[in-house]
């Protein structure tokens, strides 16, 4: 009898149902730990984000050493590094980098400010939504690249056109994410604010803005990516300085190594900015518990 | 309806007259009248859909989208405790307690309120780090820090486990003894109503079907002879027949 009930306990590890004495037998416990599947992601791998890029670099190096990759198609990593060092020594890379970074930063700041403001107006009033939401959706449907001819006619080929193009690209993700996050704030919190007799300003400050923050940050991460993307486009279409211009010039002279340096700089800038945004995000959203925790 | 505290304070704190509330064709509250005296603890029982929450939301001014008529007088200083603790997850515990409290000594009051509910030392915790019972205690602190004359509670212990609920009953009783607000406690738990309230109302078909004064001395023991009588009477009003309680 005892043996049978033990077998049953092992086969069906339900401690309360299978053990009337209220004691979980060691067999049941062992089975439980062995078969329990964790649904959460487990601990983060230290520097895990670097693993994939490092692997790519290794493949690239091996391919270059083995002669599998033609240097005219893709120069070896070390010759790209050599070119980068030369460019820095000549002072060219810094100048181009600063120009590009300044354009991206301006476009990002204007785009984020405008996108957030539009999202707030549209999210917090019916009239605002009626007026703003449609045009923003239309803008979203038009690729940034397609707008450039028009923007060149309006703003010329100077910095104004470039910053405007970037800002227009950036405001879309900021607007859409912030707006949808704002609109999905739980109505129970609105009720709470009402019973606590909060003023409108306080309600926006304490409930709406913090509640919309997760969406804003998601929008910001996309916005940073969009800013660099549009930067590439505007700098290659018409510029006399900047990383994109450097790449375009190098293409004309067949300098693959300089093209690669430019692309690596873009990648590093993109990754660096995303890292900074994520850092801010973690700081600001430390109250959350999600699948990643 | 006679005043149940002997009319000591003159006008009642809450006065509801011929209150009608309806959702589309369904009339939820049908000419309901109710007085609550200063400091009186009233429990409101009723089956699901009997209009308990509708009445509470009307008293809490949370029913601006509901059509209806009637007269409603409530004090300005009132607080609501919901079934869920409804803490803002992005605010720390103390910030949640003093939310919307525009006083120079708000933080000090908040700390005192947290001490009263037994949560000193958790001021800087995030709501998600607290247990369900602790979260509901923060919600109680948030209500009491405003010194309400009327405390409206919509099944505040409904989501808690039985043991935590009993502890919360004790806590609520102590807090009410100290702060003396009038309380309207919406509940579906007959024992909870009999344990805590001075007066128990049973809501049925949008009107008050029973109004019973509970005069068992406090602290109330579930084993008290009259406790069983009140319980049976209330259950009968709720449409549940019970066998008489046999002496053990």
Image (cartoon, rainbow, N blue to C red):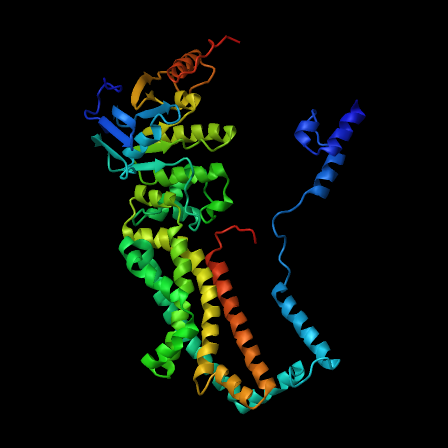
Assign the N terminus of chain B to one quadrant of the image.
top left
Q: Residue at x 36, y 81 (%)?
A: A152
In this orientation, does residue A27 appear?
yes
- Tell me where residue A2 sits by quadrant: top right
Residue B89 position within the rendered picture, expressed as x and y whole percent measured from the top left:
44, 48
Q: In this view, does B11 lie above or below B225?
A: below
Question: Measured from the top left, where is residue A39 in percent x and y?
Answer: 62, 47
State the residue at coordinates (65%, 83%): A75
Question: Where residue B110 sits in the image (x, y, percent)?
Answer: 37, 44
Q: Nearer the viewer, residue B5 or A92?
A: A92
Nearest to the observer: residue A50 or residue B156: A50
Q: Is residue B181 visible?
A: no
Q: Position of residue B166 (x, y in %)?
A: 47, 27
> In this picture, is B215 found above or below B182?
above
Numbered circles on residues, count: 0
Front residue of this view, candidates A285 and A159 = A159
Could you say which is closer to the camera, residue B62 or residue A63?
A63
Residue A248 vs residue A50: left or right? left
């Amino acid at each position: 009898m005892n043996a049978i009930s033990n077998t049953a306990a092992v086969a069906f590890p339900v401690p309360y149902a299978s053990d009337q004495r209220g004691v979980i037998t060691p067999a049941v416990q062992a089975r439980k730990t062995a078969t329990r599947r964790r649904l959460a992601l487990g601990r983060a791998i230290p520097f895990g984000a670097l693993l994939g890029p490092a692997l790519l670099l290794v493949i690239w190096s091996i391919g270059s050493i083995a002669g599998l990759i033609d240097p005219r198609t893709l120069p070896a990593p070390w010759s790209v590094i050599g070119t980068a060092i030369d460019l820095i020594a000549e002072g060219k890379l810094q100048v181009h980098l600063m120009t590009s970074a300044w354009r991206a930063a301006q476009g990002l700041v204007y785009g984020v400010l405008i996108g957030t403001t539009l999202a707030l107006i549209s999210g917090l009033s019916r009239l605002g939504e009626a007026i703003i939401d449609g045009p923003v959706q239309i803008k979203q449907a038009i690729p940034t690249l397609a707008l450039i001819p028009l923007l060149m006619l309006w703003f010329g080929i100077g910095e104004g056109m470039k910053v405007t193009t970037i800002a227009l690209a950036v405001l879309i993700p900021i607007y859409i994410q912030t707006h949808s996050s704002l609109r999905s704030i739980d109505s129970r919190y609105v009720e709470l604010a009402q019973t606590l007799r909060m003023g409108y300003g306080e309600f926006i400050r304490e409930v709406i803005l913090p509640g919309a923050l997760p969406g804003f940050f998601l929008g910001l991460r996309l916005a940073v990516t969009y800013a660099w993307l549009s930067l590439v486009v505007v700098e290659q279409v018409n510029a006399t300085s900047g990383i994109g211009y450097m790449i375009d010039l190098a293409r004309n002279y067949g300098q693959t190594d300089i093209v690669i340096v430019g692309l690596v700089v873009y990648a590093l800038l993109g990754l660096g900015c995303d890292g900074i945004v994520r850092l801010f995000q973690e700081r600001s959203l430390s109250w959350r518990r999600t699948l990643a925790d | 309806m006679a005043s149940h505290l002997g009319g000591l304070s003159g006008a009642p704190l809450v006065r509801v007259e011929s209150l009608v509330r309806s959702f589309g064709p369904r009339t939820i509250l049908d000419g309901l009248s109710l007085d609550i005296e200063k400091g009186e603890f009233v429990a409101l029982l009723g089956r699901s859909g009997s209009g308990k929450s509708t009445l509470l939301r009307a008293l809490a001014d949370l029913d601006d989208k509901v059509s209806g008529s009637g007269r409603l007088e409530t004090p300005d200083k009132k607080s609501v405790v919901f079934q869920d603790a409804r803490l803002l997850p992005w605010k720390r515990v103390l910030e949640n307690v003093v939310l919307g409290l525009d006083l120079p000594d708000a933080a000090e009051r908040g700390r005192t309120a947290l001490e009263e509910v037994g949560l000193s030392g958790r001021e800087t915790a995030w709501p998600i780090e607290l247990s369900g019972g602790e979260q509901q205690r923060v919600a109680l602190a948030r209500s009491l820090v405003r010194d309400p004359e009327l405390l409206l509670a919509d099944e505040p212990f409904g989501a808690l486990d039985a043991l935590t609920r009993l502890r919360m009953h004790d806590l609520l009783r102590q807090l009410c003894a100290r702060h003396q607000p009038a309380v309207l406690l919406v509940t579906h738990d007959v024992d909870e109503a009999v344990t805590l309230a001075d007066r128990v109302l049973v809501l049925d078909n949008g009107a008050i079907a029973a109004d019973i004064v509970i005069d068992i001395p406090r602290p109330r023991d579930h084993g008290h002879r009259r406790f069983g009588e009140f319980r049976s009477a209330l259950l009968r009003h709720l449409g549940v027949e019970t066998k008489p309680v046999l002496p053990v």
